[in-house]
Amino acid sequence: MTFPSRILPVMAALALIGCGTASMPALDGDVPPDWGDTAVGEWPGEEWWEAFGSEELSAIMQLVEERNLDLQNAERSFRQAQLALIDAGFDLYPTPIVDFNAGASYSGFEPPGGDFSDGHTESASLGLGVAYADILSKPYRYDLAEASYESAVVQLASTQLNIRVLAASTYFRILHARDQIELARRNLRTAEFIERFTQAKVDAGVLTPIDALQQQIQVQRQRNAVAQNRQEEYAARAALAILLAEPVRGFNITATTLEGLQTPRVAPGLPSELLVRRPDIVQAELNLRRSRANVGIARNALLPSISLTGSTSTASDSLKELTSDNTFSVGVGASLAQNVFDFGRRGRARESALLQMESSLASYRQTVIRAFNDIEIALGNIELLESLHKIALEDLKRAEESLRITEVRYREGVTDYQRVLTAQDFLYSARNNVLSNRRAYFNAIINLYQALGGGWTRGR
């Protein structure tokens, strides 16, 4: 987002600001040694969700942009900051003053025993002038307003990123819940099959009734899992519906599984442009800039207040003759005012502003350090989940084979029922681990995109 071109002429006064701003602090000690030497493959684009290859997810993101109520509030706040900056830009110029007065009066008088007499008078005056007060602080006040505006721009970008990340993760949550429902149904079919076989053995007197009771518990456990996952899926749909400003009743999505999504790949490394592509870093920088402007304002409060005024006026006894038969005057003035004694209030205000600036600097450094750490953690999580996914698939194959062998040996009477229960639990756990790992991997990709700023670039 850029500043509207219609108010660009106002920005001509920015030349005043150069004397009141300072460069940002060096962060050499806070940045990793290899910063700027490597990159994270390609930066995520503004529409980073397209990397998952889901048209439905892309459509949901479009609806979020159009309907989300929090995002609409952020856009209103941005517009308010935009209007405030326009006002601050005009405040850099002298204030024009127009003063026009016109009047007429009528009077009548009749003395005792005398004749009635009356009179009519008219008067008019027109004054034009300019006032330019608090000259020394104007550059700092504009810098403060401009930083506040840019902060609103960044806040809007941050809100957009956070809501989009939440929408994507909630979408994955729905699909994961649906996968869990299908998994619970598969587990239920397996448990019911073993239950029938176990009951047959109990009826034949080969097993004790306790074995059948234990398997019935397993069956009921899987039925409960189906019901719980259905409720989780409903809650996830409700969460996504809120982001789209819709009631959950009647709201649905088409996709049924995480399996249909593409798996984005990322390359390890540290980004060389992070300081200008992550909204929270830019926000911390702008907070520091506002603090510096406040220091300038507090410092100038110790100096005399300088004001300039200029005026011209004309007056006449008749409104019709205001521009011809009249009196004309021109005036120019300057004033310098100094508050001599205020019990040290201005000095304390300056010290407080300096302390706030130091706090803003510490927050800025902390945000930079946290940003690099976030990326390191996100990359580490992705690498770990990739390796765990391979292990989870191998464990699933082992669990399926283990249950198959155990069932065969159980039918033949070679092994006892407890081994069947153990093999079932291992298989259910292995299946769940595969699904959980896949969802965690998608969320890790999202977290990396968020840590990189979601494709946002300062000044856009």
Image (tube, grey):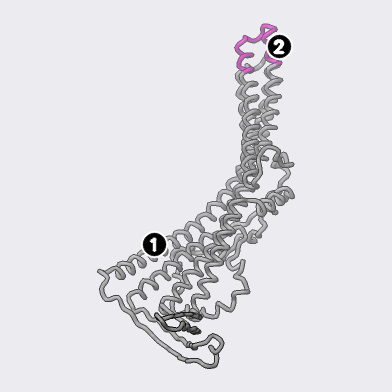
Q: Which residue is mark 1?
A: 359
| Horizontal side of residue 118 vs 229, given as left or right | left
Farthest top residue in view: 205
**Camera-side residue of 6 and 299:** 6
Residue 386 visible at all = no
* Magenta-colored span: 196-216
- The residue depicted at 63 percent of the width and 32 percent of the height is 231
Label 2 element class: helix
Q: Which residue is mark 2?
A: 200
Residue 444 sits inside the magenta stretch: no
**Residue 428, horizontal then vertical, whole percent:** 63, 29
**Residue 311, horizontal then vertical, whole percent:** 46, 86
**Camera-side residue of 354 and 388:** 354
Q: Is residue 304 above or below residue 33?
A: below
Quarter holding the N terminus is bottom right
Of mark 1 and mark 2, the one earlier in the sequence is 2
**Camera-side residue of 319 and 197:** 319
